[in-house]
Image: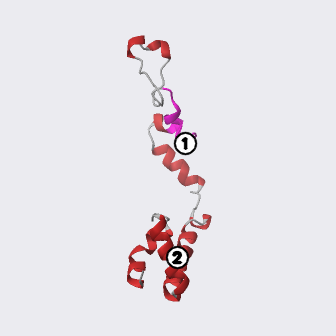
């Protein structure tokens, strides 16, 4: 593998999206090539910095209040529970088993 090929694949390698053969080839090249190794380390450093909690900020209380006040009543009541809407039985497709006729129940074999 050469530097041009590394250039095209370095982001996929950093994201662990490559198969074992390509990964091994890239690692071999990185062990021999200082320039590509440095470029890869820069990608890792950037990725690490972007995952840092220093980039996340909590909205000030007055802004949260203004946003909640602008929401319809229905959305406002569930805003204290993130994703609370998806925990409702109807949103999960959960019905009591006796609510369906027996003939319509799916048969699950070997799954």
Instruction: Provide residue 88's location: percent of width, then percent of height.
Output: 51, 29
Instruction: Provide residue 89's location: percent of width, then percent of height.
Output: 50, 26
Look at the image and give the residue range highlighted in magenta: 76-89
Residue 33, label in figure:
none
Instruction: Provide residue 65's location: percent of width, then percent of height.
Output: 55, 48
* Label 2 Cα crowd, 10 Å radius (few <14 / some 14-19 / many 20+): some
Instruction: Provide residue 72's location: percent of width, then percent of height.
Output: 44, 38
Q: Tell me the CA gap for discs 1 and 2.
A: 42 Å
Residue lying farthest bottom? 34
Residue 23 appears in the picture as rendered = yes
Which of pointers 1 and 2 indicates the residue nearer the eye?
2
Q: Residue at x 53, y 70 (%)?
A: 47
Residue lying farthest front? 21
Q: Which residue is mark 2?
A: 27
Q: Nearer the viewer, residue 21 or 63?
A: 21
* Quarter assignment of residue 105: top left
Q: Residue at x 49, y 35 (%)?
A: 86
- Counting labels gives 2
Q: Is 81 within the magenta?
A: yes
Q: Which residue is mark 1?
A: 82
Q: Nearer the viewer, residue 17 or 47?
A: 17
Q: Earlier in the sequence, mark 1 or mark 2?
A: 2
Residue 95 higher or lower than 41, as above or below: above
Residue 4 higher or lower than 96, as above or below: below
Q: Are marks 1 and 2 in contact (CB under 8 Å)?
A: no
Residue 84 higher or lower than 90, as above or below: below
Applied colour scheme: secondary structure
Classify mark 2: helix, strand or loop.
helix
Residue 101 appears in the picture as rendered = no
Viewed as shown, does residue 62 lie left or right of 103?
right
Q: Is 22 within the magenta?
A: no
* Label 1 Cα crowd, 10 Å radius (few <14 / some 14-19 / many 20+): few
């Amino acid at each position: 593998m050469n530097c041009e090929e590394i250039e095209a694949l370095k982001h996929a390698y950093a994201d662990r999206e490559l198969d074992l053969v390509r990964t091994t080839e890239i690692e071999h090249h990185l062990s021999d090539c200082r320039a590509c190794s440095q470029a890869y380390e820069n990608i890792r450093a950037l990725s690490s910095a972007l995952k840092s909690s220093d980039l996340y900020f909590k909205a000030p209380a007055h802004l949260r209040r203004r946003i909640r006040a602008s929401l319809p009543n229905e959305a406002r009541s569930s805003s204290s529970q993130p994703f609370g809407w998806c925990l409702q039985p109807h949103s999960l497709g959960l019905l009591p088993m006796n609510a369906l006729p027996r003939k319509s129940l799916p048969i699950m074999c070997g799954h």
